[in-house]
Image (cartoon, rainbow, N blue to C red):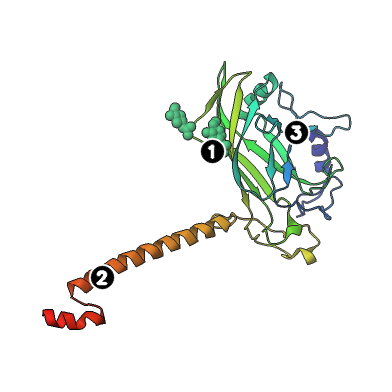
Amino acid sequence: MKLSAILIGASLLSMAKCQFFPLNRKEEIPVNLVPYKLGQEVYIDCITRSIDNGEHKFDEQERIIYAPFPICKETNKPLSFQYGVSEDFNCTLSISDELYHLFQLYIHEDAPFSCRLPLSSEANYLEKGGAYVPLTFNFRGEIHDSHLDIDTALNVLLTKPANSNPEENTFISSIAYSSGTNTTRIVIGDSMTLSLAVRWLDQIVPTGSQAGHIKNNGLPFSDGFYRFPMNFVPISYSWFIAYLAIVSLATAVLVYAFSYKHITHSASKHKYKPLDSETAVGKED
Ligand SMILES: *[C@@H]1O[C@H](CO)[C@@H](O)[C@H](O)[C@H]1NC(C)=O
Ligand SMILES: *[C@@H]1O[C@H](CO)[C@@H](O)[C@H](O)[C@H]1NC(C)=O
């Protein structure tokens, strides 16, 4: 729907009320989602924009036209993520004339690079009016007369319901943002390699939940604020636990080695000997 239509509608509404997000096209809470399987490919699609002013492109029904994310040369497919899998990978885009002009708008912050993630893994879910969460790519850089300087190192954070229940394998929120300290110089016709660090935040317990357990709240997942905790990084603990195990093992070995050396050292210094040689020691003295 066009913004002008929404603004006219909004003036007729009375006071704002709290409600669930996201809703589907019929403005209903999206239930009966087909959950994603771990590792399942998640495709994203993005708002198409006019390169003249960055305004959305619309179809005859005044609905925004979405198109797949540009194709990555590595896979020959549009960018996708593996559900629940944190990984680093590259995606090299071919910078066409159109994409170059769109990046001018994104870098200049005239328009956001807006994409979306479908809540359900069901085929054609969004075409049928399904619910989604936005995924905005916040590229940073500088615009010059003849070229663009773009920071192509991107952190991608995807928040999912805490991973105990596979029925809840969907999305809470997401964001992607440039986080490198170098830029790459881009002109029309270049290839641009994005370095993506995709991290799934799968351990966040929402606060302020009205009904934490989906079995009794009529929602597709636990509601509330999926707030970052103060003191830890809320990503899967499997690696963290593996590291902890390695570190404790290494520490144990070091402590043992050190104490063994220390004990044997003190033993020889104080001439403690194993019991068997006690007689010999006595003789020596
Ligand atoms: C991404 O590409 C760079 C070269 O542009 C390479 O050094 C790096 O290893 C690649 N990273 C991955 C995860 O493939
Ligand atoms: C950033 O650019 C400098 C040259 O300006 C280069 O020496 C350095 O390796 C680059 N760093 C990364 C992480 O690409």
| Image quadrant assignment for residue 256 | bottom left
Q: x, y (%) of residue 250?
A: 41, 60
What's the CA distance linking mark 1 and mark 3?
24 Å
Q: From the image, state whether disc 1 or disc 3 is nearer to you.
A: 3
Say few, some or many: other residues with alpha carbon within 10 Å of mark 2 (under 14 / 14 to 19 / 20 or more): some
Give amino acid for label 2.
Thr
Residue type pointed to by label 3: Pro
Q: Quadrant of the N terminus?
A: top right
- Residue 262 circle label: none
Asked whether mark 2 lies closer than 8 Å to ligand 1, one says no
Farthest residue to the left: give it.
285
Q: Is mark 1 within 8 Å of ligand 2?
A: no
Mark 1 or mark 3, earlier in chain: 3
Q: Please give left or right for residue 234 compared with residue 28 in the image.
A: left
Work out whether residue 159 can be spotted.
Answer: yes
Q: Position of residue 204 (x, y in %)?
A: 63, 58
Residue annotated with mark 1: 179
SS class, disc 1 = loop
C-alpha gap between disc 3 and disc 2: 68 Å
Crowding around mark 1 (Cα neighbors within 10 Å: few <14, some 14 to 19, many 20+) is: some
Residue 225 at what x, y percent from top left? Answer: 66, 56
**For residue 264, which numbered disc appears in the image?**
2
Which residue occupies the extreme right position in the image?
61
The amino acid type, in three-letter code, at marker 1 is: Ser
